[in-house]
Image (cartoon, rainbow, N blue to C red):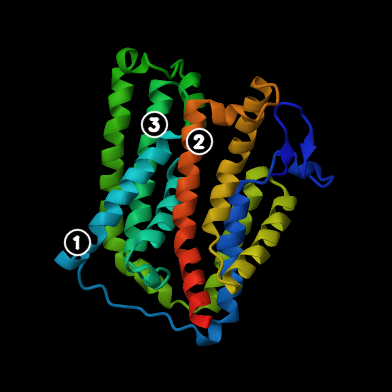
Amino acid sequence: MAEMAAQSGRLGYTFGLPQLMDGIGFVIVAMGIFGLGEIVGNIEHEATRRPMVKTVTGLMLTRAEFLRILPPILRGTLLGSLLGILPGGGAMLASFGAYALEKKVSPNAAEFGHGAIEGVAAPESANNAGAQTSFIPMLTLGIPSNPVMAMMIGALMLHGIQPGPMVMTQQPTLFWGIIASMSVGNLFLLVLNLPLVGLWVRMISVPYHLLYPAILAFCVIGVFSLNNATFDVWLMSVFGLLGYLFRKFAIEPAPMLLGFILGPMMEEYLRRALLVSRGDPMVFITHPASAAMLALSLLLLAIVLAPALRRTREQAFQES
């Protein structure tokens, strides 16, 4: 990752560009891959693009649809709750993680990207769960799990409130008010969004050559407003080209985004562990906790690779 190392102050992968000293922002990457990349891909196929616009006749799920999304909702909620508590987690990581998980385990994986209801239910459930559980370490320990919680800690401290274990006893009104606001906020989202469903559906029928300039303008404004730097806009363009290539070669971009979120943290804590162990990498194996986590990671990696290896072997046996 391009940034300055926290322990040594050395620059890594900045390529002589001072703008990369603080690393590459996640928003720049996401806007480029999912914003500009999708724009270029859709423009390329605009002549054959035929959006299906259905008339919204009812907002209630059928019994079959409810039974279909119930497992994704439960999986998304569980995954989002866990990732929301972890440092660097939160709603964004939970959404991408839930979508990637659901695409692996869902029996309707072929429909993902073409209107699969599981692809909406799981990320939304994970998003809500991650956004709310990220308050747990912030309120109980005073540790922000993501930049949004760090900003909230700063806001609380400006008002003379020290986040930590004593918040529940010293500031019960604030503590229970935050919990109540979660339910009230979701209720207001429901009240606002239900009457506007027809509007969101009709937006799909807008010709893309009229829609993409607005999307492009919002992407540029959003990225430029981060640091008021045109360099970020050019960097977004580079990731837009990368996103187009991902789309062209049918490569899933979500793992790369997860890597951009977790990569800097992984590198930082790796350096800390090696400093404590005086450069001995065996500390990751000799310590029971780290050894168990590494074994679990290898097991999960094997589970992911097993279907691909099995298909390769079956093809090899068929050819022979």
- Is residue 97 shown above or below 265? below
Residue 261 image position (x, y, % from top left): 56, 44
Measured in 3D between alpha carbons, the distance from the residue under mark 1 to the one under mark 3, in whole angstroms, is 30 Å
Residue shown at 31% from the left, 46% from the top: 77
Identify the secondary structure beneath mark 2: loop
Please state which of residues 22 and 288 is positioned toward the viewer in this rendering: 288
Which residue sits at x=18%, y=67%? Answer: 64
Q: Residues within 10 Å of mark 1 (few under 14, many from 20)?
A: few
First in sequence: mark 2 vs mark 1: 1
In the drawing, what numbered circle is on residue 67?
1
Three-letter amino acid code at disc 2?
Asn
The span from disc 2 to disc 1 (Cα, nearest Å) is 33 Å
The quadrant where residue 163 appears: top left
Check the image and report above or below for 169 versus 219: above
Name the residue located 38 percent from the left edge and 39 percent from the top edge: 82
Identified by mark 3, the residue type is Phe
Residue that lies at the very extreme toward the bottom in this rendered image:
47
Q: Return the residue at label 3.
A: 135
Q: Quadrant of the N terminus?
A: top right
Asked if residue 245 can be seen in this view, the reply is: yes
Q: Which residue is mark 2?
A: 146
Secondary structure at badge 1 equals: helix
**In the image: residue 65, left or right of residue 6:** left
> On the picture, is 315 further left or further right than 243?
left
- Report x, y in % for residue 21: 75, 39
Q: Nearer the viewer, mark 1 or mark 3?
A: 1
Mark positioned earlier in the residue sequence (1 or 3): 1
The numbered dot on residue 32 is none
